[in-house]
Amino acid sequence: MTEYEIACLGKTRFTTRRFAKRAANRIRRTGGPAFRTYHCNYADHWHLGHRPGHATYLRDTPHGPTPIQEYAA
């Protein structure tokens, strides 16, 4: 896999930071996890990611998500 495929492919892309923040807030209000917005280094889009200390798993693998224990910095 290329770095682009790992970093961008398969993620939801938002055209502006504002749209990404709205989606993150909507998810949070409905009981979902805390997300942050970030600008993609490979495309001119925005993505959502877990806030530090809130990740529950790494990217999906053929055998399901890889569980992790994340500690807040």
Image (spheres, helix red, strand yellow):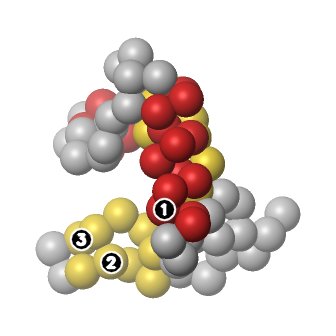
- Residue at screen point 64% across, 70% down: 54
- Of 2 and 27, nearer the camera is 27
The secondary structure type at the circle numbered 3 is strand
- Residue at screen point 79% across, 69% down: 72
- Of 33 and 44, nearer the camera is 33
Looking at the image, residue 26 lies above or below residue 60 = above
Q: Which residue is mark 1?
A: 27
Looking at the image, residue 65 lies above or below residue 14 = below
Is the residue under label 2 in contact with that under label 1 (CB below 8 Å)?
no
The secondary structure type at the circle numbered 1 is helix
Q: Which residue is mark 3?
A: 61
Q: Amino acid at mark 1?
A: Ile
Indicate the quadrant where residue 55 lies. Answer: bottom right
Residue 65's tag is 2
Q: Amino acid at mark 2?
A: Pro
Measure how far apart labels 2 and 3 are at the Cα level: 6 Å
Q: Amino acid at mark 3?
A: Thr
Q: Is residue 22 left or right of residue 3?
A: right
Is the residue under label 3 in contact with that under label 2 (CB below 8 Å)?
yes
Q: Position of residue 57 (x, y in %)?
A: 46, 75
Q: Position of residue 29 (x, y in %)?
A: 57, 66
Q: Is residue 18 left or right of residue 5?
A: right
The earlier-in-sequence mark between 1 and 2 is 1
Other-residue count near label 2 (Cα within 10 Å), few / some / many at <14 / 14–19 / ≥20: few
In this view, the mark in front (1 or 2): 1
Other-residue count near label 3 (Cα within 10 Å), few / some / many at <14 / 14–19 / ≥20: few
- In which quadrant of the rendered image does the C terminus lie? bottom right
Measure how far apart labels 1 and 2 are at the Cα level: 20 Å
Q: Is residue 11 left or right of residue 40?
A: left
